[in-house]
Image (cartoon, rainbow, N blue to C red):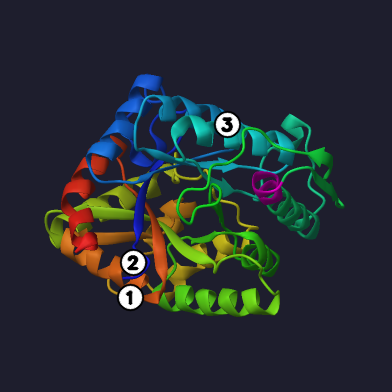
Amino acid sequence: MSNPSEFLWYIPNDVKAGHRGDAVAADHNSLETLTGQARALEDNGWKGALIGTGWGRPDTFTVATALSARTTTFEPLIAIRPGYWQPAHFASAAATLDQLSGGRVRINIVSGKDNLAAYGDSDGGQEHRYARTREFMRLVRRLWTEENVNFTGDHFQVTGSTAAPRITPRHDRRHPPLYFGGASEAAERVAAAEADVQLFWGEPLDGVRERIDRLRALSAQLDRDLPPLAFGLRITTVVRETSQQAWADAEARVAEMAKTNGAGWQDHREAVAVGQRRLLDLHTRGDVIDDNLYTAPGKFGGGGAGTTWLVGSADEVARSLRKYQALGITHFVLSDTPYLQEIKRQGASLLPLLRD
């Protein structure tokens, strides 16, 4: 494969214990616990981890900085929001961490709903939100790759701006890659023009194929002036020694979710978001789609990457992920709980199959 795949995990970064079935412990979000997960990722073959964001969670950039200082190869995929950050502030902060960490920073730009008023931001509607995001991404990239930047947009302005320190190019990596999600038409136009990696949630293969084709066509239509858009998948992977064990565990977990209305699973469950609505509607096609894409969690409180799960033995889940690879997916963000246990289990059983 000319463009080898990369495999990351997920660190929820939540003040409440028990996220998506994780072990409930008082120190679940301590620096020691999170460092233990980051180091386990290094030791078990993972490239790094997406770190969750949202008002009411610990500041994601601060957590990523702390974990970068305590690791040597761990690459944080730092979720951030335009509006929480100004572009020049963010460009400088990210460039600083990139220098200090030896080029390990990745960025996930998030435009979805949040408690914006709590930090002085506001939402002018979808068109405004994505226009601002597009401006933010374009300006941050310019601040990383140009000096004395002048920019006057509808949302941001800078004059004679040179972000320091300067980003050190590393092979074909000119700056930290910008990941982006979203399934609405407005979101896809931002991705096609400005993102380095478009992240999908766990849609069936036909849905992912359709979206990749559309985004590639949009990139050409919008005269994209960046390297070709890459694609990623963010999904829950329930891997056990046998298929029977995996399905028994998955079904038992969904039964428990049904009793508690999905308590602890709903941090991304925004019914108004186009991508989330697509996921929640999948169960109308059946509880299992393709070979082993389990849609039932979405009926009982699963949200975001917890809405659909790939379930099975390591061989079965690897076979399904390879089908996504064949469509053009090169960036995978996987997870299951308990997080630390599954970092090790899937690192040992699943990752070797995906690298063969």
Nearer to us: label 3 or label 1: 3
10 Å neighbourhood of mark 1: few (<14), some, or many (≥20)? few
Give the mark, 3 or 1, whose residue is nearer the N terminus.
3
Task: Please state the horizontal and vertical placement of residue 84, each as a whole percent of the image.
Answer: 70, 36
Q: Which residue is mark 1?
A: 290
- Give the residue type at disc 3: Thr
**Which quarter of the rendered picture does the C terminus lie within?**
bottom left
Cα distance between the residues tagged 3 and 1:
44 Å
Which residue occupies 30% across, 46% down? Answer: 46
Numbered range of the magenta stretch: 140-146
Which image quarter: residue 296? bottom left
Task: Tell me, yes or no, whether the two marked residues, 3 and 1, touch with CB atoms within 8 Å.
Answer: no
Cα distance between the residues tagged 2 and 3:
40 Å
- Give the residue type at disc 1: Asp
- Give the residue type at disc 2: Leu
Numbered mark located on residue 305 in the image: none
Label 2 SS? strand
In the picture shown, does residue 50 fall above or below 190?
above
Q: Which residue is mark 2?
A: 293
Give the mark, 2 or 3, whose residue is nearer the N terminus.
3
10 Å neighbourhood of mark 3: few (<14), some, or many (≥20)? some
Magenta run includes residue 142:
yes
Closer-to-camera residue (334/172): 172
Q: Main secondary structure of the magenta part?
A: helix
Task: Tell me, yes or no, whether the two marked residues, 1 and 2, touch with CB atoms within 8 Å.
Answer: yes
Which residue occupies 87% across, 52% down? Answer: 154
Label 3 SS? helix
Q: Which residue is mark 3?
A: 96
Cα distance between the residues tagged 1 and 2:
6 Å
